[in-house]
Amino acid sequence: MSQQHPAKKAGTRPARLDASMSLLNNVIDHSLDDGYAEAAARRGVTGRSHLPTTLRAKLGLAFGLVLAALVVTVGAAQAQRAAPTVEKERQELIDRVEGGTADADDLQSEVDGLRETVAEMQRKALEEHGGDKGELTALLSGSTPVQGPGIKLVVDDAKGSGGDAGGPREGSGFADTGRLRDRDLQRVVNGLWESGAEAVAVNGQRLTALSAIRAAGDAILVDNKPLAPPYTLLAIGDGQRLSTTFQDSADGQYLHVIQENYGIRTSIAAQDEVKLPAAPSVNVRTARPVEEEKGSTE
């Protein structure tokens, strides 16, 4: 007799085939966290607006806006009241600066006047105590202005080298070979003296036996005064002869070489008359002849 399977109870649900994977089923059925779901539902009821909905919250927001507007208004009013005071202080500073500048200009004029007085006294002393060579001594010392025939020599930096601004040169140094250096100007001046110049001036600056030509940074100084290119040299002497002698000299040839190799610009011309000012200051020094040793032969 065959064995029969027991009958299934009525009303019972059949078992799920994936009942053994309850954890995976839970993750799938509840993919959104309950807290997020609740927040999303609440937002759907109240809407997306963040504005307060209660009367108390609305009054608080209005009070905050009024307070912010009051602060801005008070700040603007204070700035407006303080503006005249700031402008007054600024004007006072400007007046002080202008007053100090005027005082400095007056003092500089006084110094220039005193220097001129001293120079005039020195010139008179040279004329009175120089004997029959007083005029020559004054000429050689540069203590008196002079005029007469001579030459005009203009030396300038190479074109495009940065020396065309009309003021003291500025740059990284003398590495730029298109710029005239202090020793170049020294050689030119010494060449003029050697060629027979009786008096020399550079850009209106009278040179004496004690004048110094040197460099300070990227500028050329003559007696501590910065000069700007082009450098105009005026020399008293027989114009045509002085010009020829200088150009044939070693220093004249040196000037020609730097003109050919580095683009230095030069021009020279004889002048019927040139005027040179007196030196701004002359250092008064004394000298005595060297005593010859006994038994020395000429």
Image (cartoon, helix red, strand yellow):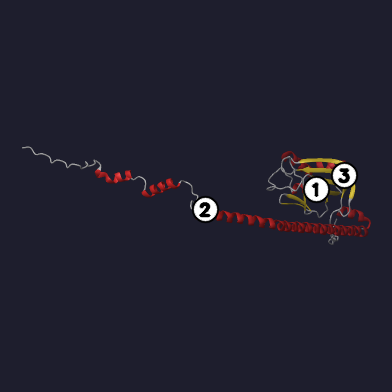
In this orientation, which residue lies closer to the viewer: 82 or 196? 82
x%, y% of residue 209? 82, 54
Say what amino acid the circle numbered 3 marks: Gly
> CA gap, disc 3 to disc 2?
97 Å
Q: Is residue 53 left or right of residue 240?
A: left
In which quarter of the view is residue 143 placed?
Answer: bottom right
Q: Tell me which numbered mark, 3 or 2, is placed earlier along the sequence.
A: 2
Give the Cα distance between marks 3 and 1: 14 Å
Q: Secondary structure at mark 3?
A: strand
Q: Residues within 10 Å of mark 1 (few under 14, many from 20)?
A: many
Residue 34 in view here = yes
Q: Using residue 204 as the reference point, say whether residue 264 is left or right of it.
A: left
Describe the element under mark 2 as helix, strand or loop: helix
Is label 1 in a helix, a strand or a loop? helix
Q: Which residue lies under the disc numbered 2?
A: 58
Q: How many marks?
A: 3
Q: Quadrant of the C terminus?
A: bottom right
Residue 220, image x, y percentages: 75, 50
Residue 247's disc is none
Q: Which residue corresponds to the image point at 32% horizontal and 44% vertical from the top-left?
A: 29
Q: Kindly identify which residue carries mark 3.
A: 150
Query: What's under tag 1, amino acid-wise?
Result: Val
Residue 195 visible here:
no
3D distance between C-alphas at marks 1 and 2: 91 Å
In depth, the one of 241 and 225 nearer the eye is 225
- For mark 1, what is the residue? 189
Do residues under tags 3 and 2 come within 8 Å of each other at their CB atoms? Answer: no
